[in-house]
Amino acid sequence: MTLLPYGPRALLVRYADRADEGAFRLGRRIAAAWESESGADAARCVDGLASFVWTGDAVALSRVRGWWGYRSWERIAEESTAGRVVDIPTEYSGSDLTRVAELSGLSVGEVIRRHAAPLYRVHCLGFSPGFPYLGGLDPRLATPRLATPRVRLEAGSVAIGGEQTGIYSVPGPGGWNLIGRTAVRLFRPEAASVDEAVLLRAGDRLRFIPVESCAVPERSGTPERAVSDGVLEVMSPGVGLTVQDGGRPGLGGYGIPPGGAMDPVAARWANRLVDNPEDLPVLELCLQGQRFRAKRDVWLALTGASGGISGRCSGWSAFRVRAGEMLEFGPGPSGVWSYLAVPGGWGVERHLGSASSLAKAGFGLRWGPGLCLDVARGTHPVIPGFTAGRRVQASEVSPIEGTPRIRVWPGPQWDSFSVEDRERFVREPWTVTPQSDRSGYRLSGPALHPNPPDILSEPVLPGSIQVPASGQPVVTMPDGPTVGGYPKIAIVDPADLRAVAQCRPGRSVRFEWATEPG
């Protein structure tokens, strides 16, 4: 068993080398012991296939170290691991089915037979909401992940990654080998609670039932109701437009990422400018092109990267808008994300405790002509009538020009990289590529070569810098996977992740150690 630091606010524990039934049972015993013996202010625990990550402040993590140090796991009573048995009708027609057959030396028919034969164990949920990591795959079918992850796989895709198999629960990127699909919905964002939203649980058993054809699962989520009246009418969402607040921390065990604003400092300042609590919902604008029409007089606050509203304001300020005014957001000189706040916060639906949009899970508004945004119900801050405007002091605004130096901490697998790669990582500049979004920022530069190139999937935190087989790092962002199997050379200091987020495609970043690796 190994206890490792995972940045300044987390600890990673590996308790097995393989994701087998013995490892699963040991993990359940550890989790049960922590749940029964930890206090209310304890560090938060999320599990992987044969690992745990505890997150918390320095005091909470110190308690984890002490607790872990005196445990004797063979004395912990065995937990019941019976679980339910869930059948998954599957059409075996994936684009990588032939690749799996070739690498295994089997026929396609034999691959299908072997994949459908076991009664699988759900070891954990992760990567995306409701995605099950399944133990029990025939060893002959183990297949390396793709060198470059696909940009998008559909919900219901059945795939193999390394020694695990699983089902993509929502549309999104993925690096596993696609062998089939199912119409069973593993995640329902319209559900009122997380227990109703997620079909499977750790400990459940699962069978794949081969069928001739399978309908594509219906699109997750339902469009939120577009109100006919409000304070702003959306004329165009521009390059990108979402609603964000403090996100959904604490749901990583269900595969649900924390989400929230890409630049939380700018989002908090937008709320402060109109006297809101800092975590109320704001509009997050990507780059440029958003257009709105004011339907009634209202105060707004704009912060972040935007160049401001054409002919109206220059950003990092609060201002009054009159009914009928058109607001068009142009590009700033640098940066990506901007924030628009209104007194009282935006009145949008909440999903699992948060208003934050998460497109791949079906959370959030579907932008279209005629959609109007209103203020949340309740008491709103009243800005005095004699106020002409408000502006954030220049000393409070962090510059987002030039090449930022991003502080990083050693990742859990930093010793899987050669001395040359470690030095190259902090010596060379890295360029943000256009294939970057709220899930991950892909970087280009000299290739890094971890050994081994894959690891047993374990919890992934925002800011983790994963290195897939292509050798090009990916910085995990707030909507990124919660579990992954690529080595992590480093993790961005939490205070610096916003600086990464504000880097446009084509811009360079440099990394420097926040603390020298030991």
Image (cartoon, helix red, strand yellow):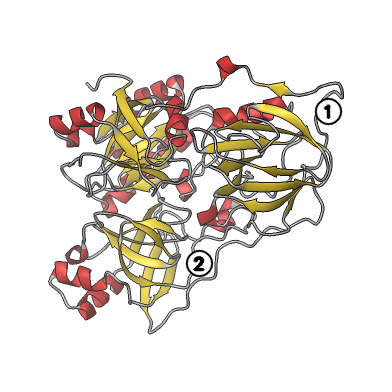
C-alpha gap between disc 1 and disc 2: 45 Å
Percent from the top left, x then y, of residue 508?
A: 34, 33
Residue type, numbered disc 1:
Val
Residue lying at the far top of the rendered structure: 395
Precedes in sequence: disc 1 or disc 2: 2
Percent from the top left, x then y, of residue 239?
A: 54, 49
The residue that label 2 is drawn on is: 185
- Quadrant location of the C terminus? top left
Mark number, residue 398: none
> Quick check: 259 above or below 149?
above
Residue at screen point 83% across, 28% down: 382
Mark number, residue 382: 1
> Quick check: 225 above or below 290?
below
Tell me the mark number nearer the camera, choosing from 1 and 2: 1
Residue type, numbered disc 2:
Arg
- Based on the displayed image, in which of its 4 quarters is residue 228 positioned? bottom right
Density class for disc 2 (Cα within 10 Å; few <14, some 14-19, many ≥20) is many
In the rendered structure, the answer to whether residue 93 lies left or right of residue 362 reads: left
Viewer can see residue 34: yes
Nearest the eye: 126 or 176 = 176
Residue at screen point 14% across, 31% down: 420
